[in-house]
Amino acid sequence: MQVDVPVGGVLAALDIPLQEGPWVQSGRKLSRVVVPCRLKAEIRITQTQAQDIVIGQTALIDTRTDTIQGTITRIDRAVRNGTVTIDVTLPPDLPPSARPDLSVDGNVIIERLDDVPYVGRPTFGQANQRVSIVKLSDDGDFEDRVTIQLGASSVNDMQALEGLMEGDEVILSDMSCWDGFDRVRIRN
């Protein structure tokens, strides 16, 4: 029997040891051939963040030494272990750090907002909600509870639409144990 591969590439793995004589079931994976200039990245996005992702968006793939810009070409319909798998097509001129089966990190650019006030993501902050957070007072001795309006969000930051001024310092961690107080004194 002769097995032909429809594309030219490099033999990356031989899944079963092949010798003359044994039978192989039809459809069984025998080997894996990689075309080095046609790699793709698979990234897993948490199901709550995957809702805004669409085909055609830009994704940045971090190989730990390089960042490669790719395009989302497939979004898995199924959720597995709380994540959605997304395929990112990479350009043909890849850096030397891009290799088959490499563990990578990926960020999807959903929207880019320039010159907007933002704050780090509060513990219980959700996009387009009003939340109560604790802000350091001007004298630095007290923390005052303020209500802010959040806008668009990313993994680490959120747009601050109302309630904060540039330069305000806030506490982003859980302060729910102090919910009954509007002002808390800081001691060094």
Image (cartoon, rainbow, N blue to C red):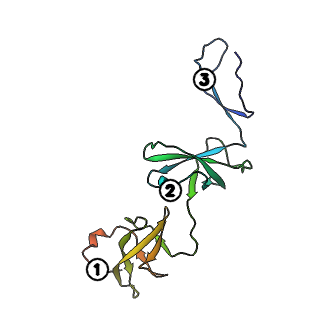
Looking at the image, residue 115 lies above or below residue 55: below
Give residue 161's position: percent from left, percent from top.
46, 75
> Are the residues flagged by discs 2 and 3 in contact, CB closer than 8 Å?
no
Residue ID for mark 2:
52
Between 16 and 43, which is closer to the camera in this rendering?
43
View extreme (left): residue: 180
Give residue 85's position: percent from left, percent from top.
52, 45
Front tag of 3 and 1 = 1
Q: Quadrant of the C terminus?
A: bottom left
Dot 1: what SS?
loop
Q: Residue at x 38, y 79 (%)?
A: 135
Whether residue 133 appears in this view of the structure is yes
View extreme (top): residue: 21
Dot 2: what SS?
helix
Q: Residue at x 37, y 64 (%)?
A: 124
Between 25 and 139, which is closer to the camera in this rendering?
25
Between 141 and 78, which is closer to the camera in this rendering?
78
Q: Residues within 10 Å of mark 3 (few under 14, many from 20)?
A: few
Disc on the earlier residue, 2 or 3: 3
Residue ID for mark 1:
182
Front tag of 1 and 2 = 2
Q: Kindly report the distance in space between the C-alpha atoms of the residues bearing marks 2 and 3.
A: 41 Å
Give residue 16's position: percent from left, percent from top.
60, 23
Q: Residue flagged by tag 2: what amino acid is it?
A: Asp
Q: Residue flagged by tag 3: what amino acid is it?
A: Ile
Q: Residue flagged by tag 1: what amino acid is it?
A: Asp
Give residue 84's position: percent from left, percent from top.
49, 46
Location of residue 173 by image quarter: bottom left
Q: Kindly report the distance in space between the C-alpha atoms of the residues bearing marks 1 and 2.
A: 36 Å
Q: Is residue 121 left or right of residue 96?
A: left
